[in-house]
Amino acid sequence: MGDISDWLKNQHHMTETASNVAADVEGVLNIISAAGTGVGAATVVLQAIGVLGSDNTAKKIDELITDFGYLFAVLEANSNVWRMDQIGTQYDHALTQLQHLDEHKGDLNYLKANTFDLDNNSLDALNQLADGKSWVRPLYPQAVYSDVFSGTLGPPGSHGPGSIVFDYRLSLSAFLYALAVRMTILWALAQVDPHYQDIAKTEASGYASTLLERYAQMWAGIANIRALTFQEIREPALPTSAFMFWQLANRPYGAVDTYSTVRQIDQFPPDEIPDLKQNAFQEVLQAMYNKFWFRQWIGTLARWKRVYRLMGLPNVKAIINHLKAIAGESPVQPTRPDIGDWSLLEAEQATPGSIYPRHGALVLQLSLRDWLIKSFDGSVLTGAPILGKTSISVRRTLENFAGLQ
């Protein structure tokens, strides 16, 4: 098989919107596979789901079970948690339905004779994977981010080793694949029974809601490394002080996906740390701290956006909106800062007044060029001339200021 999105579109006459679902599913699978998982066997995690339609599917699923099965050994008797092999089984069921459809593409008699099996088997696999039991795992110390400054940044709702926490990595991939298969089968069956178009719309609405809940859980799992406070920088640098722990941790700033520990964390530039212990007016010291905080926050925000993209969240949100389009519903509206790209409003609102004075309702009268030059001094990167004047690249300026390459 070729790319799943092209294959589904060409062989089964999917609508453009339905094929977009498959295209974004591919995007999520590829991104999550590349991101890894932060545990010992990270090199093979999720590659099973990435090999869509391959004859090696069973072998790859077995690798997943071998590499991660020990995490579930303590929960064999727990009916609230699915075993890794059960997720793999449902994936195989979805794959089998797609293979059957492929073997009889264009055969309306086959569709008429096998409507019941194609419908029920694809729906059963998808509903099993949508069940909350397949989206959790036990918490184990090896898969939790920690440093001497931040402490332990565990997933939301965690209560120590052995507690049950949400985890999207394997289940999301299998669920999205089964979802693409289900939409494909419904559109194929609509060729022999138009009623299946209505079924597709109804199910698309329901699964969009399910996926939106999972999206919100994934979003909530991104944690920022906190900034030092004014007082923590100003207080004596004792061995047990927050400032010293921050130094011991190599001055971390950035963000981490607490489910997988995939992260974008770098070292804050030492020459940008203000000397707040000097004798100076409070206003002067506060302005120095504001400059530090601003650079730290923009740097953190840039890295948060990188983690957001590494998790495949832009693709997940696109899938939700494609499903809503099938259902005839309005798309999910963007909510700052849950986008992987930059918002000028969020960057401008983060600019301290001591760096760029507002003089009233500046948000409505923002001089973009003036703001960039004054707020990001030394980091401004120019672009091609526009109407005879040198332009400024906003994205490149922000990421240059944030220290991203």
Image (tube, rainbow, N blue to C red):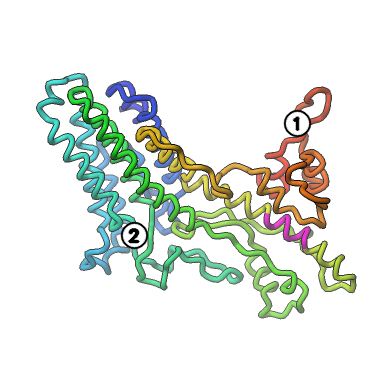
Q: Residue placed at 37% from the left, 43% from the top?
A: 208
Q: Is residue 47 above or below residue 221?
A: above
Residue underneath mark 2: 136
**Quarter occupied by the N terminus:** top left
Residue underneath mark 1: 383
Looking at the image, the residue that sits furthest to the right is: 280
Looking at the image, the residue that sits furthest to the left is: 113
Asked if labels 2 and 1 touch by Cβ distance under 8 angstroms, the answer is no
Q: Which mark is residue 22?
A: none
Q: Is residue 8 left or right of residue 354?
A: left
Q: Residue placed at 21% from the left, 68% from the top?
A: 77
The amino acid marked with disc number 1 is Gly
Majority SS type along the magenta span: helix
- The answer to which of 381 and 354 lies nearer the viewer is 354
Q: Is residue 189 left or right of residue 344?
A: left
In the image, the segment drawn in magenta is 290-297
Q: Residue placed at 54% from the left, 48% from the top?
A: 338
**Residue 134 in magenta?**
no
Query: In what element is the residue under mark 1?
Result: loop
Q: Is residue 379 left or right of residue 336?
A: right
The amino acid marked with disc number 2 is Val
Visible in this render: residue 54? Answer: no
Question: Where does the image place residue 15, in percent across and percent down from the top left?
Answer: 34, 24
Q: Is residue 188 left or right of residue 257?
A: left
Question: Where does the image place residue 276, in percent across and percent down from the top left?
Answer: 81, 70
Question: Where does the image place residue 298, in percent across and percent down from the top left?
Answer: 68, 52
Q: Is residue 113 above or below residue 343?
A: above
**Quarter occupied by the C terminus:** top right
Q: Is residue 166 above or below residue 230?
A: above
- The answer to which of 215 and 102 lies nearer the viewer is 215
Query: In what element is the residue under mark 2?
Result: strand
